[in-house]
Amino acid sequence: MSTASADPAGFIRRNTALHEPPLVPEVKLHLATEIVPIWQMTEEELEQSGLPPPFWAFAWAGGQALSRYILDNPDVVRGKNVLDFGAGSGLIGIAAAKTGAKPVLSTDIDNFAVEAIRINAASNGVEVEATAEDLVGVENRGWDVVLVGDMCYERPLAERIEAWLRRLAAEGVTVLIGDPGRTYLPKTGLEKLISYAVMTTRELEDTDVRNTSVWRVLPG
Ligand SMILES: C[S@@+](CC[C@H](N)C(=O)[O-])C[C@H]1O[C@@H](n2cnc3c(N)ncnc32)[C@H](O)[C@@H]1O
């Protein structure tokens, strides 16, 4: 077992620092201090031990936009049962909990992300449950709102989640997606709620600012 996977919490603390994402200064997250080294480190370990790249070490543009929208429109989540799906650092679920959502469940299939979500929730003094269970396709477990930040970057993943999210929307769940124009964002069946200019880094994106929108999934 690699050092990192033996002690995910230690790895996260050693390779990150508490930062505020530019569009969401209300939330502090353990984010990569230097992007390239942490990405390479996990990619090298990936070859040895199957670790995924550290998506959890960044506040992605889609997640920042959706978090901003929630904080500015608290009625969307206040007092509601919320799922942050594909949570990464946990940014969106933490923003929802800060806004008064309860309970909040954050899911990510990467065990490092689950650890990062727990650490980041504690750093913000909010209650968020975190799990690595893959929930795609499951029945609604009581969620009023499902929040999805920046998940449309791979075709198989985007296709798997679309049918599930549409079914939840058809059952009356409010399903919101934050997305900076990724290739596999569905082209139809979405209502645009708002757009933001999100500062990004050229180490992750091909531009300094990404026009990023929050979409409501229409019932299928
Ligand atoms: C680009 S990151 C976005 C993270 C966060 N939502 C944000 O906006 O900052 C996508 C995340 O989705 C996670 N992921 C991929 N497939 C998943 C699945 N089936 N269930 C839960 N998470 C998944 C990845 O591990 C990764 O952390």
Image (cartoon, grey):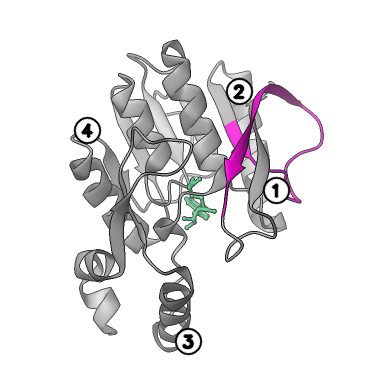
On the rendered structure, is 167 left or right of 34?
A: right
Q: Residue furthest right?
A: 187
Residue 78, x across and y down, in percent: 36, 15
The residue indicated by pointer 2 is: 169
Q: Sequence-wise, which precedes: disc 4 or disc 2?
A: 4
Q: Looking at the image, which residue is at 65% across and 47% down?
A: 209
Q: Which residues are magenta?
A: 177-200
The quadrant of the picture occupied by the N terminus is bottom left
The residue indicated by pointer 1 is: 159
Residue 47: image tag: 3
**Which-is-in-front pick, marks 4 and 2?**
4
**Which-is-in-front pick, marks 3 and 2?**
3
Q: Looking at the image, which residue is at 46% across and 68% down?
A: 35
Looking at the rendered structure, the kind of residue marked 4 is: Val
Q: Residue furthest top?
A: 75
**Residue 220 visible at all:** no
Looking at the rendered structure, the kind of residue marked 2 is: Ala
Residue 181, x across and y down, in percent: 72, 44
Q: Nearer the viewer, residue 24 or 133?
A: 24
Residue 126: image tag: 4
**Image quarter of residue 188:** top right
Q: Sequence-wise, which precedes: disc 1 or disc 3?
A: 3
Asked if labels 2 and 1 touch by Cβ distance under 8 angstroms, the answer is: no
On the rendered structure, is 111 left or right of 163?
A: left
Q: Sequence-wise, which precedes: disc 3 or disc 2?
A: 3
Q: Is residue 144 above or below residue 25?
A: above
| Some atom of ligand 1 lies within 8 Å of the CB belonging to the residue at label 3 | no
Looking at the rendered structure, the kind of residue marked 1 is: Glu
Please tell me whether mark 3 sits on a helix, a strand or a loop: helix
Q: CA–CA distance between discs 4 and 2? A: 27 Å
